[in-house]
């Protein structure tokens, strides 16, 4: 079914309550294991139906935040989603208490029940009003970010549309665009600060009601991190600081020399070469046609998958007024359909979307028929391996998108992959500070952000941009507001993606086979078990970060970037 044909249905709370109560009665009264298994399968079907309704509303609202119908539907979802979560939890409690639990565990897997047990720690009915408040605050942040209508070069532009000028080859253009971009954030700084403070306090209150000392442990459980903890993450951050920060310092120095700028501003690092950054050789329609050729040549399965995405209009790629910023992939279980949302703006990021988000979607497509919903996709850090690795698997086809600028793109892409790591762990360390100190003021949080910037990215120079100098850059990072602690995931995945890159540099076919094996496992195992089964390194083990960074620094050094 094409996306526009999927009906917009606002979930009926009374109907949902009645349905889940009936499911609880049935599992309690099941007299055979076959009957109990049938009830669980019916539960999966009901859950898929509700998730599909909510996901379709969310997608349409993010495509057009100014449409009143979608906005009202989203408001209803924000209100009822925590209540529906309560209904599902009631069923899962009955499921765990079932006399057929051993047989159900054998049928659906122990990890499914481990996830259920963990979910009991993250929810009870007393927190429903707090969850509703949290949802509304997140929606308000997203709507405020999407509301920008900034006049520049004769057109009104949102932040995504303005973003392409931040990497313009003309320095004055970069400065003008940055003044407007961050000026919008500064104009709304008071409300951004209030929204974040309310979110932190609300989440902390939720944690306290559930018996946690702080939100940190609850945040990890919400993300279903069942096989690693914050101490292991701290050790991993230390690896990035010790191994990667010195490498990125050299890369920034190398970049400044290429640009011929003795004292670069932060915005100068958006430009990789004096001749300009690599730009795709066409609009979105052209890029989709290139991607189609690439995925058909990559493998028969990836070709069929991409046809499915195109034929069913499951991508909304162009930036436009009222559209939420950023990009994502989500999944509509009723129609077994991934959906890709992006904001193309004429930069190389447009190609990154057609590799990164398609990597997510490809995994969703391969696991669309998995019976247990929780097994269709892995936890978030493993999901990001799927997307970030696909970016590197696409390298042999970059000439389609960039023609004679393909090598230019590859160097920038690999540089960016490594350079991202210090920023990613900076975001993570900041969030640990915030939720361990929930009563910190907006100013104290900004001061902490500035301290961490100097630790992980000491090359940044905000001269002339007092707003950023005062620790406000983080406001544009939606994950900090919307999905706390979901950011270290990108860095963990990037390290694994770089491992895939090391493998494909030696044997592309072997790397692809290993990648497909990982995708098809979906979410059947926790993160570290997935890595073990795919024979990939554990990034938490000291020294493993260095093992992937060192070979790829050699790859970077093989490029003649001074002549790009």
Image: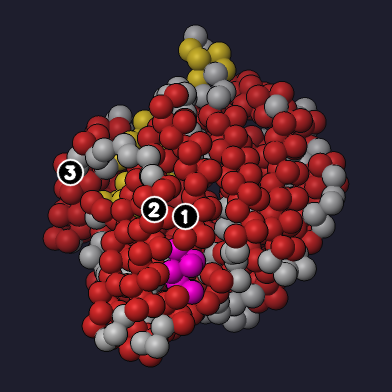
Between marks 2 and 1, how big is the CA–CA gap? 7 Å
Q: Main secondary structure of the magenta part?
A: helix
| Viewer-proximal residue among 330 and 23 | 23
Q: Position of residue 262 (x, y in %)?
A: 71, 38
Q: Are marks 1 and 3 in contact (CB under 8 Å)?
A: no
The residue lying at 55 percent from left, 24 percent from top is 147
Q: Position of residue 365 (x, y in %)?
A: 26, 59
Question: Which quadrant is home to the N terminus?
Answer: top left
| Marker disc for residue 165 | none
User: Which residue position is annotated with label 3?
Assistant: 1
All told, the count of numbered labels is: 3
- Secondary structure beneath dot 3 equals loop
Name the image quarter holding residue 521.
bottom left
The residue lying at 45 percent from left, 63 percent from top is 88
Magenta span: 88-93
Q: Which is more N-terminal, label 3 or label 1?
A: 3
Between marks 1 and 3, how big is the CA–CA gap? 26 Å
User: Which residue position is annotated with label 1?
Assistant: 84
Q: Are marks 2 and 1 in contact (CB under 8 Å)?
A: yes
User: Which residue position is annotated with label 2?
Assistant: 16
- Secondary structure beneath dot 1 equals helix
In the picture shown, does residue 249 fall above or below 280?
below
């Amino acid at each position: 079914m094409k996306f526009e044909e999927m009906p917009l249905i606002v979930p009926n709370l009374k109907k949902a309550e009645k349905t889940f109560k009936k499911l609880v009665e049935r599992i309690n009264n099941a007299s055979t294991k076959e009957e109990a298994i049938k009830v669980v399968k019916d539960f999966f079907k009901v859950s898929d139906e509700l998730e599909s309704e909510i996901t379709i509303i969310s997608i349409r609202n993010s495509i057009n935040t100014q449409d009143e119908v979608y906005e009202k539907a989203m408001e209803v979802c924000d209100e009822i989603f925590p209540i529906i979560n309560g209904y599902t939890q009631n069923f899962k409690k009955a499921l765990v208490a079932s006399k057929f639990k051993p047989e159900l565990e054998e049928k659906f897997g122990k990890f499914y029940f481990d996830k259920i047990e963990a979910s009991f720690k993250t929810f009870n009915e007393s927190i429903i009003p707090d969850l509703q408040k949290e949802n509304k605050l997140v929606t308000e942040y997203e709507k405020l970010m999407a509301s920008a209508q900034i006049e520049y070069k004769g057109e009104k532009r949102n932040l995504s549309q303005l973003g392409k000028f931040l990497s313009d080859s003309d320095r004055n253009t970069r400065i003008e665009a940055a003044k407007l971009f961050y000026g919008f954030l500064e104009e709304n700084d008071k409300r951004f600060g209030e929204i974040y403070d309310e979110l932190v306090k609300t989440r902390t209150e939720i944690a306290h009601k559930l018996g946690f000392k702080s939100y940190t442990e609850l945040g990890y459980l919400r993300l279903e991190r069942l096989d690693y903890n914050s101490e292991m993450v701290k050790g991993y951050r230390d690896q990035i600081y010790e191994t990667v920060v010195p490498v990125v310092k050299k890369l920034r120095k190398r970049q400044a020399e290429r640009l011929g700028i003795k004292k670069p501003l932060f915005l100068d690092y958006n430009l990789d070469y004096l001749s300009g950054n690599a730009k795709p050789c066409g609009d979105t329609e052209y890029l989709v046609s290139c991607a189609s050729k690439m995925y058909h040549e990559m493998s028969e399965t990836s070709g069929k998958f991409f046809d499915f995405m195109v034929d069913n209009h499951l991508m909304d790629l162009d930036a436009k007024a009222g559209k939420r910023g950023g990009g994502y992939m989500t999944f509509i279980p009723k129609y077994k359909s991934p959906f890709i949302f992006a904001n193309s703006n004429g930069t190389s990021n447009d190609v990154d979307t057609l590799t990164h988000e398609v990597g997510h979607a490809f995994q969703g497509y391969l696991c669309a028929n998995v019976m247990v919903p929780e097994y269709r996709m892995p936890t978030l850090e493993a999901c990001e391996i799927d997307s970030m690795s696909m970016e590197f698997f696409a390298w042999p086809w970059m000439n389609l998108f960039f023609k004679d600028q393909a090598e230019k793109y590859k160097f920038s892409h690999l540089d960016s992959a490594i350079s991202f790591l210090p920023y990613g762990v900076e975001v993570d360390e900041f969030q640990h500070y915030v939720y361990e100190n929930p009563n910190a003021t907006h100013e104290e949080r900004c001061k902490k952000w500035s301290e961490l910037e100097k630790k992980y990215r000491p090359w940044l120079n905000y001269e002339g941009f007092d707003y950023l100098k005062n620790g406000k850059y983080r406001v544009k990072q939606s994950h900090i507001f919307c999905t706390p602690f979901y950011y270290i995931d990108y860095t963990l995945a990037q390290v694994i993606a770089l491992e895939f890159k090391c493998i494909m540099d030696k044997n592309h076919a072997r790397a692809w086979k290993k990648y497909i094996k990982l995708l098809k496992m979906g979410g059947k195992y926790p993160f570290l078990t997935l890595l073990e089964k795919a024979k990939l390194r554990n990034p938490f083990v000291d020294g493993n970060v260095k093992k992937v960074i060192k070979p790829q620094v050699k790859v970077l050094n093989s490029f003649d970037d001074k002549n790009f």
